Amino acid sequence: MNSFKRHMNILDFTLSSLLRRKGRNTALIVVYTFVVFILASVMFFTHAIKKEAAVVLNSAPEIVVQRIIAGRHDLMPSEYMAKTKDIRGVRSVKGRLWGYYFDPIAGANYTLMVADPANPFAGIDLSKVADGNIIIGSGISRVRLAYEGDVMPFRAHNGNPVYLNIAGILPSESELISADIILISEKDFRALFGISQGRFTDLTLNVINPREVQTVARKITEILPDTSP
């Protein structure tokens, strides 16, 4: 009982001291709470970004090669694929198709990507991305009020309307990087942007030995001086 009374006296003294300066102590509590809230928010947000980056980079290629003409990104001819395949240490080379599309209704840019079985979005049935079908990000779905089974209109490079069926919505787990992404078939992508066969946005290379990435990148610049790996 003596120990209990001693602790009660300490608590009573502490509360009395705090109540004598209500305004000052309340202000300190508010400031400290705000500081802890800001620090915790930054830490949680940083952790979320790292987690999303790990999901994306899990299946990302070791090297991405872009063609540069007059300091600007240009389309990659398919002949460059054969030249990079011959480099020792390269396991595989793929041509990617992706680009930006401005939606005047939402006033935003969407990222259109041709569906790839090695894409970073896990748990997606890519068989749904057939000709005439697309899979959209959850952010686009909310802004456009568009859901699976709806039809989404686009304006092609020549001004003609293109109507594509929404076959699915990208999972919310990867929303940080997939909210504005649309997965589309190669045929629809080329028709929408007017890109001919044998042309790609860029190339992706998988290297057998990760320690040889810098060596392979240097060889690419020697063989293809108008590219940037």
Image: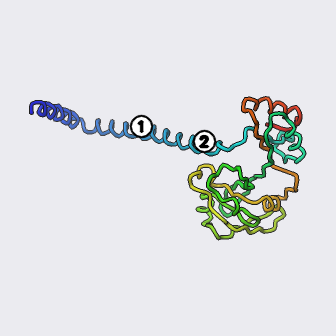
Residue type at tag 1: Val
At x 49% / y 42%, what residue is drawn? 44
Comparing 41 with 3, the one in front is: 3
Up the image or down, 92 lies above or below 89; here it is: below
Q: The residue tagged with tag 2: helix, strand or loop? A: helix
Comparing 201 with 209, the one in front is: 209
At x 79% / y 29%, what residue is drawn? 215
Q: Label 2, on which residue? A: 54
Q: Earlier in the sequence, mark 1 or mark 2?
A: 1
Task: Give the quadrant of residue 21.
Answer: top left
Residue 43, percent across and down?
49, 38
Density class for disc 2 (Cα within 10 Å; few <14, some 14-19, many ≥20) is few
Say the numbered circle drawn on residue 35.
1
Up the image or down, 6 lies above or below 174; here it is: above
Q: The residue tagged with tag 1: helix, strand or loop? A: helix
The C terminus is located in which quarter? top right
Residue 214, percent across and down?
76, 30
At x 82% / y 30%, what residue is drawn? 218
Residue 91, percent across and down?
79, 39
How far, Cα to Cα, is label 1 from label 2? 29 Å
